[in-house]
Amino acid sequence: MELYIIRHGETKWNSEKRLQGRSDIELNEYGIELARITSEALKDVKFDRIYSSPLKRAYETAEILRGSRKLDIICDDRLKEMCFGDYEGKVTDTLPDEFWKFFDDPVNFVPAGNGETYEQVIERAKDFLYNVIVPLSYKIDRMLVVAHGAFNRALMISLNHQGIKDYWEGVFQKNCCVNIYEINGDNFKLIQNGKIYYEDKGGKDYRK
């Protein structure tokens, strides 16, 4: 089975570099455009299942990516973005130095009040992986998952058999980037990593 993992399109908060987490922010006009461009690039891909985070920015992206396919979008709470607690809604440049361990030293990152740990997000991702993705790999040919930057990385490091120290290793997950894995039961192979189908305007790599 081919597994497509796609991040949602841009939101107003993305453009302002505000942490979103569980805050339910919809796509902005540019985000809709990115989703449409990506949808056009993938229009000939035959998906058998579409799963999405229930948060607006992901679900709206999934609706656009679905195009004319006669498929229901299955929402799953396990696909929600990492909760950033008291940091949500804040511009990243205004956050305390402790926050930057999120990218620079994930092993020692301590979430803000009411926020999730990396371990909790990875636990959700593995639950979805082994209870949804792996069983479906024996039954269908192609599956689409639309979710979020931090959650998608949790799912990807689980597929890559990596640990928290590798969380942000490699290609940054830009809006509407497309990752593809080949899933054969418990065997996972990365085929495409973070490809975008639109002209990059410089992106917003929060690691920098």
Image (cartoon, grey):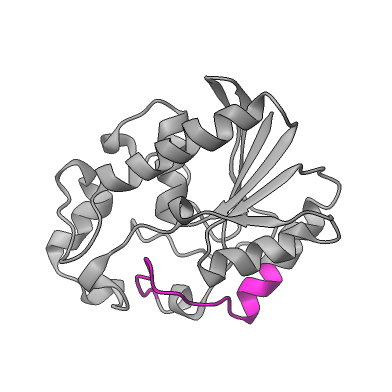
Relative to 29, residue 113 above or below: above
Q: Tell me the quarter of the image containing the N terminus.
A: top right
Toward which corner of the image does residue 27 lie, by quadrant?
bottom right
Q: Position of residue 192 (x, y in %)?
A: 62, 36
Numbered range of the magenta stretch = 17-34
Residue 96 drawn at (x, y percent):
14, 69
Q: Quadrant of residue 107?
A: top left
Along the line of sight, the residue nearer the viewer: 61 or 12: 61
- In this picture, residue 4 sits left or right of residue 113: right
**From this viewpoint, is residue 170 visible?**
no
Tell me which residue sits at (39%, 73%) in the image: 23
Return the x and y of residue 140 as percentages of the image width and height: 73, 31
- Residue 64 part of the magenta-drawn span: no
Depth check: give the residue in front, 189 or 22. Answer: 22
* Residue at the image position 30 percent from the left and 31 percent from the top: 163
- Majority SS type along the magenta span: loop
In the rendered view, tell whether residue 43 sits above or below residue 85: above
